[in-house]
Amino acid sequence: RSRRRPAGWAVFRCARGRVPPLSSREAAADEKLALGTGFMEYRYQELVGGMAAGLVQDALLHPLDVLRARLDTGVSSATARSAANPATALWCEAQSVAAVDGMRGLYRGYTLCLAASAPANALYFGSFKASQRALGDTSVPATGRDFIAGLSAECVASLLWTPLDVLKQRMQVGPTDLGTLGATRDACRVGVVGLWRGYFAGLAVWGPFSASYFAMYEGLRRAMGSGDGATEASARQSIPAGLGAGAAAALLTQPLDCAKTRIQVGAVPRNLGLLSVMRRVYVQEGAESLWRGGAARTLWLTPGCAITITVFEAVERLLR
C-alpha cells in the first residue's frame, strides 16, 4: 500500500542519492513562475521588470516626449518651426511651453502614462524574452534571433501601446485643459476603433526600431564580452549598449515617426497612409519638417533605452 510523502520528500531523496536530481530544464521551470506554455512563455520576473522600466523612463523623460510630439505635428511655436536645426527647434519649443504653461505643460499626458505605460512595457519586455527563448533552439543566428524577437515584441505590445499613444499624443499637442476623457471622446468619434488608429503605421515605425535596437543591443553586449546576448549583463555593459543602440534606431526611424504621430493625433485625413503623409509633409513643408523632432526623439529614446534595459535587467535579476 502506497503512502503519501511530505512535500520535501523528493528533495530529501535527491540529497541522499536515491533518485536522480531535477534536470536543468525542470529546475528552471520549478524556480520561475511562468504564464503560458509552448511557443510563448511569460515569466513574472520579466513582466515586473518591464513595468518598473517603463515607470522609471516616463518619470525622467516624459517632457522630451511632449516636445517631440509637438515638433512632429507642427503645433510648435513659430520660433521652433523656423529654427535652423532640430536641436535649436527643441530648445525654442521647450522655452515656449515652459513660458506659457510652466512645468505642467511639459508633463501633459503623464497621468495616463502612469496607468498604461507599465503594463505595455511589461508586455513588451516579456514578449521579447519569450520570443528569444522560443527561437533559442532553432538554427537562426543570434543576431537574426534578436531581430525577430524585437519585432514580435513590438507587434504584441503595440496592442496596448497604440491606444496609449493616440490619447497621450492628443493631450500633448492639444489645449492644456484637454484631459483623458476629452481625448478619448475626440479619438472615438469614428468608434472605439479610433483608439487603434495608426496601429499599422506604428508597427512600420516601432517594428524596425525594436528589431534593430535589440539586434544592435545584444550585438554590442556580445562585443563587450558578455558572451551570448541572452545571458545576464551588468549595468556597465547594459548602459553603453542601450545608449548606442537606442541612438542609432531613433535616428533611422525619425521621418516615419513624424508621419505616424500626425496620423494618430488626427492632423491629416484618415485615408492617408504612412508614406502618403511623409510625401505630403515633404511637399508642403519641406524635408526639414520630417526631421524637426529628431533631436527631441533622440534625446528621449537614447537615454530612455539605456534606462529601461538597465532597470529591466536589474529588477529581473533581483527577483530571480
Image: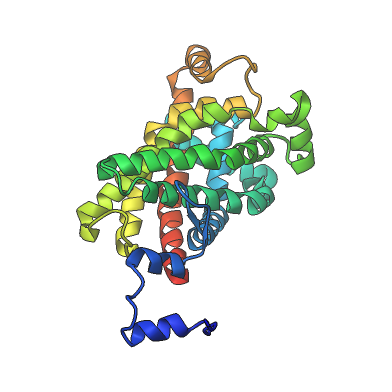
Spot the residue most to the front. Answer: 1
Residue in the image at 62% along x and 47% along y: 106
**Above/below status of 4 relative to 29:** below
Q: Position of residue 43 (x, y in %)?
A: 49, 59
Q: Nearer the viewer, residue 143 or 131?
A: 131
Q: Position of residue 54 (x, y in %)?
A: 54, 54
Residue in the image at 51% along x and 64% along y: 33
The reply, left or right, for residue 19 in relation to residue 314 is left
Residue in the image at 68% along x and 51% along y: 111
Q: Is residue 247 visible?
A: no
The reply, left or right, for residue 317 in relation to residue 186 is left
**Above/below status of 17 relative to 212:** below
Q: Position of residue 318 (x, y in %)?
A: 45, 71
Q: Is residue 24 visible?
A: yes
**Above/below status of 223 relative to 19:** above
The reply, left or right, for residue 137 in relation to residue 30 is left
Q: Nearer the viewer, residue 153 or 138?
A: 138
Residue in the image at 46% along x and 51% along y: 304
Q: Which of the image's four quarters has the C terminus?
A: bottom left
